[in-house]
Image: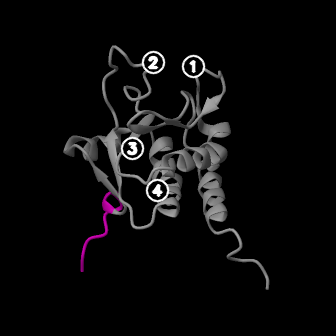
Amino acid sequence: MKDKNFLDSSVRFKFVKDKELILLVRPVILSLFYGCVVPIVEQNIYNYKITVTRTVAEKENDSISNSHAEGRAIDIRIKDMPKNAPTQIVCSLNEILSKEFGAISHKSKKPVFAVLEKDHIHLQTRFGVYYNILIMFACAKTYMQLNKGAYSEE
């Protein structure tokens, strides 16, 4: 029987180090990633495996925030996604997760969980958000939205 490691489920890593470093990100972003992001991407793109391009990293000179250095961010590749998928994914994630978990945007000054960049989607939580019952509600909310109508009475 094949070992079912949750890290290998629907996710691959651009660099081997990120597969190890993903376990060092804050529990909030890790839980939201596997409980909300992965299902939403799978819903939008059939038979697609997410590629994580960055997890915990030192702050770069051109970086706006410390979110990666603080373990509050994960980046996923978009170059192999269908044309409209990244925009749909970002909108879905922000609708469900921004209010409770999103980092404060430097541009809008509002909480934003997912940011569409030129070559990736940047997922981020704000500083001071800790793992709590809201994570379970966010994952349940994601599940319910992905299964709209599945439980309706006929």
The mark nearer the N terminus, 1 or 3, is: 3
Image quadrant holding the C terminus, namely: bottom right
The mark nearer the N terminus, 3 or 4, is: 4
Q: Which mark is residue 106?
A: 1
Magenta segment range?
A: 1-8
Could you tell me which secondary element the residue under label 1 belongs to? loop
Could you tell me which secondary element the residue under label 3 belongs to? strand
Q: CA distance from mark 1 to mark 3?
A: 21 Å
Q: Which residue is mark 3?
A: 76
Q: Which mark is residue 38?
A: 4
Tell me, what colour scheme is on the image? one colour
Q: Which mark is residue 64?
A: 2
Q: Is residue 21 shown left or right of residue 127?
A: left
Q: Residues within 10 Å of mark 1 (few under 14, many from 20)?
A: few
Q: Residue at x 26, y 71 (%)?
A: 3
Q: Residues within 10 Å of mark 4 (few under 14, many from 20)?
A: some
User: Which quadrant of the figure has residue 113?
Assistant: top right
Outermost residue on the top side: it is: 61
C-beta proximity under 8 Å, tags 2 and 1:
yes
6 inside magenta stretch: yes
Q: Residues within 10 Å of mark 2 (few under 14, many from 20)?
A: few
Q: CA distance from mark 3 to mark 4?
A: 11 Å
Q: Is residue 6 shown left or right of residue 35?
A: left
On screen, 115 above or below 63?
A: below
Magenta part, dominant SS: loop
The mark nearer the N terminus, 4 or 2, is: 4
- Please state which amino acid type lies under the numbered disc 1: His
Outermost residue on the right side: it is: 154
